[in-house]
Amino acid sequence: MDQALAREALANGAGGILRVDLGALKANYLKLCQLAAPTPVSAVVKADAYGLGVAAATNTLYAAGCRHFFVALTREAFDLRPHLPADAALYVLNGLTPGSEDRAAAAGLIAVLNCPEQLDAWANVARQTGQTLPALLQVDTGMSRLGFMPEDLKALAHAPERLQGVRIDYLMSHLACADEPANPANGQQLEAFERASRLFPETPLCFANSGGLFLGAEYHADLCRPGIALYGAAPHLDRPNPMQSVVALDLAVIQTRNVPAGTRIGYGGTVVTDAPKRLATLSAGYADGLPRRLSDQGAVYFRGVRLPFIGRVSMDSIIIDIDALPEGALKAGDFVELIGPNQSLDAVAEAAGTIAYEILTQLGPRYYRHLIAAEG
Ligand SMILES: *Cc1c(COP(=O)(O)O)cnc(C)c1O
């Protein structure tokens, strides 16, 4: 931990330091581009770029050459659109919310059309305004979440007048099991997508998320659509992670103490010491997005030494067992590593019984956020 940064964070009153390495984000984007080439690669920046900060993330990705951005909600798109250069396309994965279509058209958003009703609403605005409005047409190939059912798509292919005023830039679909390369569902979805695409033979295709991009060229189609790999988590959990880590999280020690045998620790007194113990209390908790499920499961590192969580994770603090360190080695004002070189984001997620997506998107607003600029 950089001492100047640690002092700055404490002087600003923060209990933790979240470092976002925009150079690593850029390197990850370029790596995915290289892997997908000649297919271009978009960036999924929904949920504040998976919690990292959408403004800095999109600036970095745009500078690295990205021209296609995806958010989930119409609201996110309204917020982001004014900050994106005009030649960047912005797509709304969940489809436009009913009643937002006029404003969305005026803002230049690109609707993902997930059902006939969304298509009709978009086509209506096109007719009323005399514009041609851009869209992605999503087909459900086996996830049962969003998109036209294959039979609805077939009906549409036979009634092209319904598309009047709407320009379909891509036919898209989404993989349900791309993080499990051996799962036969991947091949089945690819086949279903190929069948669907025969109904719209001229339309480019958009298919692969992070996991899909690593499944091979047949999944790349005409535009890749990764999110999590950009932000440094492993696209396939059972394989070595080829991505650079983007996020590091260090937490401040606010107190240390020595307790005798028979001492209850934390809410509920769920742990009672069986011998004298040295403890430290950290200034972050579940209100900062550190899951309560990390109680007695999580750990932090200090100078490479693992220090386990002990007792329950509180809202604003976590108690750790520091017996593994020499007496006096850890003091109030020191920082310990939760996510960093000793412990990956994926390892923290696994200890919490969840996935990196959830850990990233829950990282709270109380951390001192330090952006490390990308070079060039
Ligand atoms: C979130 C999302 C993505 C990105 O998925 P990752 O697994 O983060 O790469 C792509 N497409 C759709 C439809 C999504 O919802």
Image (cartoon, rainbow, N blue to C red):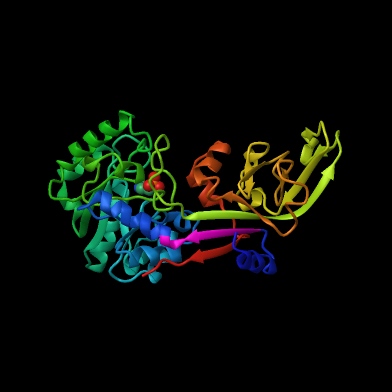
Q: Nearer the viewer, residue 225 or 160?
A: 225
Q: Quadrant of residue 374?
A: bottom left
Vertical placement of 132 versus 315: above or below? below
The image shows residue 346 at horizontal and vertical percentages of 50, 42
Q: What is the count of numbered marks?
A: 0
Q: Quadrant of the N terminus?
A: bottom right
Identified at 14% across, 41% down, the residue is: 198
Q: Quadrant of the C terminus?
A: bottom left
Q: Quadrant of residue 144?
A: top left
Residue 120 at least partly seen: no
Q: Residue furthest front?
A: 326
- Seen in the image, is 280 located left or right of residue 80? right
- Seen in the image, is 333 located left or right of residue 104? right
Identified at 42% across, 52% down, the residue is: 244
Q: Residue furthest left?
A: 202
The image shows residue 178 at horizontal and vertical percentages of 35, 38
Q: Magenta-highlighted stretch: main secondary structure?
A: strand
Q: Quadrant of residue 312?
A: top right
The image shows residue 277 at horizontal and vertical percentages of 80, 39
Does the magenta-highlighted stretch encompass residue 22? yes
Residue 297 at least partly seen: yes
Q: Nearer the viewer, residue 171 or 102?
A: 171
Does the magenta-highlighted stretch encompass residue 335? no
Vertical placement of 358 versus 61: above or below? above
Q: Nearer the viewer, residue 157 or 192?
A: 192
Q: Magenta residues?
A: 16-23
- Seen in the image, is 40 located left or right of residue 57? left
The image shows residue 15 at horizontal and vertical percentages of 67, 59
Identified at 36% across, 37% down, the residue is: 176
